[in-house]
Image (cartoon, rainbow, N blue to C red):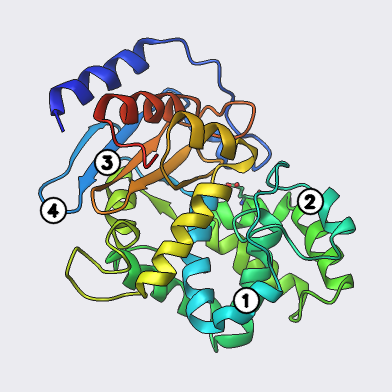
Amino acid sequence: MKKTAIQDLFAEIKSTHNPGKIATYIPELAKVAPHQFGMYYQPVSGTGFGLGDHKQPFSIQSIAKVFSLTLAMQLEGEALWQRVDVEPSGNPFNSLIQLETEHGIPRNPLINAGALVVCDVLMSHLSSPQADLLQFIRDVTGLPQLSFTETIAHSEDETGYRNRALINLMRDFDNIKNPVEEVLDLYFHLCSINMTCQELAQGFQYLACHGRRSLGGETLITTSQAKRINAIMQLCGFYDEAGDIAYRVGLPGKSGVGGGIIALRPDQYTIALWSPPLNPKGNSYYGMKFLEEFTTLTGTSIF
Ligand code: GLU
């Protein structure tokens, strides 16, 4: 992996016009300075490196849904798949359309409806859901300083009409078992975590290392669970742009409306990108462009 080639690619992308639009439906996200762009590359063995604004914390939003899914798979096992499917949705992340026709069973755990069901499952298992989920995320990422960001959680709560519509529809289909406002509160907090590119790349190493903290290191989840989470990320991690990401990038990953993207090549590396302006599908414009060129340059698409 040639560092100078990656530096050149980063500089080249940064110099191009960015037609993306920052997410404004969560008022706190609308305040973020749009020109920021960071990248961190972390190989499974050896030292990583960052470029641009890689030390700047940002709202990881839906990227955190991978952590809640990891915990729910551990706690609920195969029974989880009776409550949520593993199919790409082909629809925007907050769409209500399929939920009605598919009887309140979300297409996958990484769209909003699916993540709300996952939060409901967690609430049924955990005695202090917020504290326990946060502790799990700290443990699995190896980042004990992580915390929820109350201003973001509050901002989402204030404008969370669509998430309220989703959860109430699922409650009507009996696919939400706990009080809807409590499940929403856990969900909004989950989406409120701030991380840097460096922390994200470090925190997702367990999925590049077959469920271990590092190759051959401490086991966090089983090999099979890691494989399945990667499969779900490949098919469902980039909103309704999953086909395009498989075609152009060829890595499992997850994006968030804060403009962050985590992607990984099992056995090789994790890579985190952040640039707030989003393309029409809701993925970071620069982030997607970088990843496409990056896997071509390095020959590391999984296909
Ligand atoms: N908290 C955001 C929402 O519920 C997450 C969206 C995302 O990053 O995909 O709308």
Mark 2 packing: few (<14 Cα in 10 Å), some, or many (20+)?
some
Which label's residue is closer to the chain start, 2 or 1? 1
Q: Look at the numbered discs 4 and 2 and tell me whether their residues touch, using CB distance below 8 Å.
A: no
Residue under circle 4? Answer: 45
Going by the numbered disc 1, the residue's amino acid type is Leu
277 relative to 143 in the view: left or right: right
Q: Look at the numbered discs 1 and 3 and tell me whether their residues touch, using CB distance below 8 Å.
A: no
Residue under circle 3? Answer: 55
Q: Residue at x 52, y 75 (%)?
A: 73
Q: Nearer the viewer, mark 2 or mark 1?
A: 1
280 relative to 202 in the view: left or right: right
Separation of marks 4 and 3 at Cα, in angstroms: 21 Å
Residue 249: quadrant of the picture: top left
Residue 24: quadrant of the picture: top right
Residue under circle 1? Answer: 80
Separation of marks 3 and 2 at Cα, in angstroms: 32 Å
Q: Residue at x 65, y 49 (%)?
A: 88
The picture places residue 198, in percent across and down from the top left corner, at 27, 46
Q: Is residue 192 visible?
A: no
Q: Quadrant of the N terminus?
A: top left
Separation of marks 4 and 2 at Cα, in angstroms: 42 Å
Task: Assign a secondary structure to mark 2.
Answer: helix
Going by the numbered disc 4, the residue's amino acid type is Ser
Which label's residue is closer to the chain start, 4 or 2? 4
Q: Residue at x 48, y 74 (%)?
A: 71
